[in-house]
Image: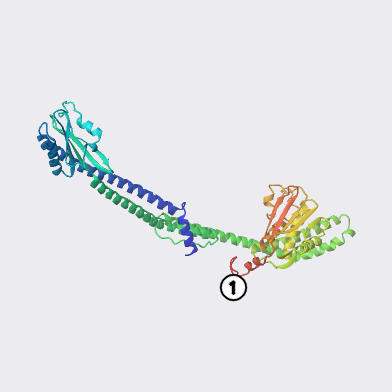
């Protein structure tokens, strides 16, 4: 599986991904719809089944009471009730019968169709009270007694219990009909509806997945193209097909990418022209500057013998010539960094000796305190390290306050060099800009001894080593510049070589 496919799969499985949300929404809608439809279907079928069974049983029981129980004598015997109950149950659609009457002295007698199935204990008290209660006769009620029914559960089995009384002193009859078959039918229906709901849920998830794939595939391609565009591959374009909104979005992306590529190309061309101009100008200035510098040095040697009115002008020319020469050298160095032609020339150096040599070459030994152990070796570019140290220490001497302390130590595989002065420190609003090119803390003093490129060049030299420089203010006063470099920059050189692989890859086989 490719990395793009893995990334797409991981993105699709995130809870916050659009694909997952579409699937969840589709599934929830399908679940609600299927559950609602199944619930309504189950309720309608349940009422229909129970109403049909109940109506059939009650109508037959009413007819049997009118035909069989009403034909019994006013004072029937137990055998009469037993025989009538048996006849009613045998001709009924599957229910048991209980008939109750009174003897001469008010003692009840009961006849059962099946004593093991249906007794008076199975009749709820509330139903018995309703059946025994005489109803008042009105214009809307012509009968004293009515047929009442109730659904109950006996030993976990649902039953229909109904009862009525023969008008005119006849027996009271009760019937018991099992609804277990109807319950089984309804359970089967419930299982069927549940399976249908589950299938609908699975189908909706598959449909959502298909819809999400159809809709999100162009969005994913657009995201991949945008990612490539952000990585600098400005020639990235999308294949456009169709006339829908996503196709319009792809066309807009292609137009935007084309416009961005053109603008970046124009900016790169202008930047390249500017670098070439600075490089050519710096190169062309070096020849006349060499001659001017030589003449200036001669004039400086003879300054004491010149007219006192002319000597200050000679000193100014010499100073500005040196400043211009430094500026041209700095511009040449910046141009090499911008063009990407700057390279490291590594050597194994004793860091303490290298720092001492830098300080001694510029006659700073009296103003700088060095804290470094000899024998601390590092593989670096000594010339570029000298440039970094010269800029940091020179900046501390020029803008900070003596004494300037230089401390060298190691932290794991890193070389750490701290340059601290005892001046007023760096203003907080200046700290973020100290490494910017041509930046000067005081805008009212644009003309100073420095060019504003020193710290920028130091930072570039640190970066080419794979290191960095940070600036801060010490709690005890003064500014602290911290240089961090890898103790072995060999890996940086290997990665900068043409044809080198990505970091962490071995180019050999």
Query: At 84% from the left edge and 61% from the top edge, which residue is drawn?
Result: 299
Residue 317 locus on image (x, y percent): 80, 58
Query: At 84% from the left edge and 63% from the top edge, which residue is drawn?
Result: 298
Q: Secondary structure at mark 1?
A: loop
Q: From the viewer's perspective, is 52 left or right of 256? A: left
In the image, residue 387 sits, relative to residue 82, either above or below, namely below
Residue 399 locus on image (x, y percent): 76, 51
Please state which of residues 205 and 124 is positioned toward the viewer in this rendering: 124
In the image, residue 315 sits, relative to residue 185, either above or below, namely below
Please state which of residues 331 and 152 is positioned toward the viewer in this rendering: 152
Q: From the viewer's perspective, is 244 left or right of 73? A: right
Q: Residue furthest right?
A: 305
Which quarter of the picture shows residue 86?
Answer: top left
Residue 296 locus on image (x, y percent): 82, 62
Please state which of residues 458 and 436 is positioned toward the viewer in this rendering: 458
Residue 8 locus on image (x, y percent): 47, 59
Query: At 73% from the left edge and 47% from the top edge, which residue is drawn?
Result: 475
| Tag 1 residue | 508
Give the crowd class for mark 1: few <14, some 14-19, many >=20 residues within 10 Å: few
């Amino acid at each position: 599986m490719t990395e793009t496919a893995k990334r797409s799969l991981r993105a699709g499985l995130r809870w916050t991904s659009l694909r997952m949300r579409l699937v969840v929404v589709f599934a929830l809608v399908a679940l609600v719809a299927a559950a609602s439809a199944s619930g309504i279907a189950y309720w309608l079928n349940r009422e229909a089944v129970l109403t049909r069974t109940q109506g059939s049983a009650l109508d037959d029981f009413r007819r049997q009471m009118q035909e069989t129980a009403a034909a019994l004598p006013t004072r029937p015997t137990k055998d009469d009730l037993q025989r009538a109950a048996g006849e009613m149950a045998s001709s009924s659609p599957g229910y048991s019968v209980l008939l109750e009457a009174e003897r001469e002295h008010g003692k009840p007698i009961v006849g059962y169709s099946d004593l093991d199935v249906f007794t008076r204990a199975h009749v709820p008290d509330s139903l018995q009270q309703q059946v025994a209660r005489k109803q008042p006769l009105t214009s809307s009620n012509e009968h004293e007694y009515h047929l009442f029914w109730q659904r109950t559960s006996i030993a976990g089995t649902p039953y229909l219990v109904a009862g009525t009384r023969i008008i005119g002193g006849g027996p009271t009859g009760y019937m018991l009909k099992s609804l277990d078959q109807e319950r089984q039918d309804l359970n089967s229906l419930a299982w069927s509806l549940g399976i249908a709901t589950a299938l609908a849920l699975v189908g909706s998830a598959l449909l959502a997945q298909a819809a999400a794939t159809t809709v999100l595939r162009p969005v994913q391609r657009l995201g991949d193209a945008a990612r490539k565009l952000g990585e600098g591959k400005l020639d990235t374009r999308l294949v456009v097909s169709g006339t829908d909104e996503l196709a319009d979005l792809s066309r807009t992306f292609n137009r935007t990418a084309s416009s961005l590529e053109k603008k970046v190309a124009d900016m790169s061309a202008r930047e390249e022209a500017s670098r070439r101009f600075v490089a050519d100008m710096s190169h062309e200035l070096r020849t006349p500057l060499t001659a001017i510098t030589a003449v200036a040095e001669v004039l400086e040697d003879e300054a004491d013998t010149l007219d006192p009115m002319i000597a200050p002008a000679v000193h100014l020319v010499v100073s500005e010539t040196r400043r211009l020469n430094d500026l041209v050298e700095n511009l040449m160095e910046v141009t090499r960094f911008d063009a990407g032609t700057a390279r490291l020339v590594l050597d194994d150096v004793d860091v303490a000796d290298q720092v001492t040599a830098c300080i001694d070459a510029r006659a700073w030994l009296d103003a700088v305190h060095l804290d470094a152990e000899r024998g601390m070796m590092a593989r670096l570019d000594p010339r570029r390290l000298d440039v970094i140290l010269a800029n940091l220490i020179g900046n501390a001497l020029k803008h900070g306050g003596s004494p300037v302390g230089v401390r060298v130590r190691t932290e794991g595989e890193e070389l750490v060099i701290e340059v601290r002065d005892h001046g007023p420190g760096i203003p907080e609003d200046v700290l973020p800009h100290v490494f910017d090119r041509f930046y000067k803390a005081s805008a009212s003093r644009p003309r100073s001894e420095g060019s504003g490129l020193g710290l920028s060049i130091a930072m570039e030299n640190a970066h080419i080593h794979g290191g960095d420089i940070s600036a801060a203010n010490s709690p005890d006063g003064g500014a602290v510049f911290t240089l961090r470099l890898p103790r072995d920059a060999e890996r940086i050189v290997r990665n900068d070589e043409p044809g080198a692989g990505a970091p962490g890859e071995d180019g050999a086989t």
